[in-house]
Amino acid sequence: MRVLIIEDEKVAADRLEKLLQEINPQYQIAAKLGSIKESVSWLMNQTADLIFLDIQLSDGLSFSIFKQVPVNIPIIFTTAYDQYSIKAFQLNSISYLLKPIRKDDLVESLEKYKKMKAAFSINFESLHPMLTGQQQPYKKRFLVSYGEKIHKVETSEIAYFYAMDKSVFLTTFTNKSYPVEYSLDKLEELLNPEHYFRINRKYIINMAAIDKMYAWSRGRVKLVLTPTTEDDKDSLVSIERSTRFKEWLNS
């Protein structure tokens, strides 16, 4: 696997290269670049299988690279940004490493890359305002229909969203359910990550809907929600999301 490291701190770049070689000596470091200008020039003529990208480079935010050259390579961010920005990465399904990088975290990110590389989709337009301190406009309410009537539901009234039979529904704290015209993936972008978390493929929950929690097998967490779900398995936090779920609760 060819790896491109874009990092303006030589010590950090060298350390990342050393960790990668320790994990798998067959990883080939295609290049170590320290600026936007260098990166654009390199990417115009060459490619790699994976990029490790620092957010802040010597000549500006690294997002400007992608305005100058098309890049369809999976990216793992390396960043010293705070927890709020990290939530932005999670919202956009981007792997990240908080500096100084720990070997265990690097291994975990590489495993995630292997599982998800075919589905990587990076929305740089959405990330940019979050990382430059601009407020993300999260959705405040939803318009829902039942029969011939149209009803508005405030986002704060929603206990959870769930997918069923190729449709998505919301359920309020008063246990009323309505169909919504968004996928769960899109809802992850629209909802404030301080209050909502996607626990598995079927459910996005409001933190306020959690009634009880139980330790489950393989590091998972079993939730009891209010209102209750139809199937107990629906409120089980998936293996791959359990660590982030605990971090979310503890943030």
Image (cartoon, helix red, strand yellow):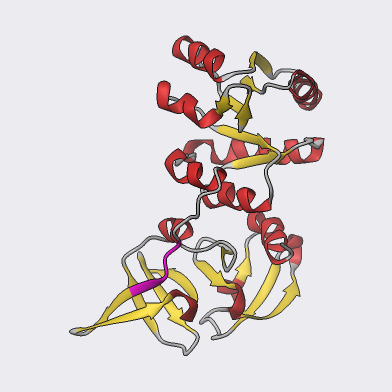
Tell me the residue at 50%/86% (across/down). 173
Q: Which residues are magenta?
A: 138-142
Q: Can you give x and y, in whole percent of width and height, for residue 188 in the image?
A: 48, 58
Kindly report the secondary structure that dominates the magenta region of the rendered protein. loop
Residue at x 79%, y 35% (from the top left corner): 100
The percent position of residue 149, horizontal first and vertical second, equals: 21, 85
Residue 193 position, x and y percent, is: 56, 61
Q: Quadrant of residue 56?
A: top right
Q: Is residue 203 toward the left or the right of residue 83 in the image?
A: left
Q: Nearer the viewer, residue 87 or 93?
A: 87
Q: Where's residue 68, x and y in %? A: 41, 21
Q: Would you place residue 108 above or below residue 143 in this image?
A: above
Residue extending furthest left?
148
Q: Is any atom of residue 54 visible in this view?
A: no
Camera-side residue of 68 and 200: 68
State the quadrant of the C terminus: bottom right
Residue 231 belongs to magenta span: no
Quarter of the image for the N terminus: give it.
Answer: top right
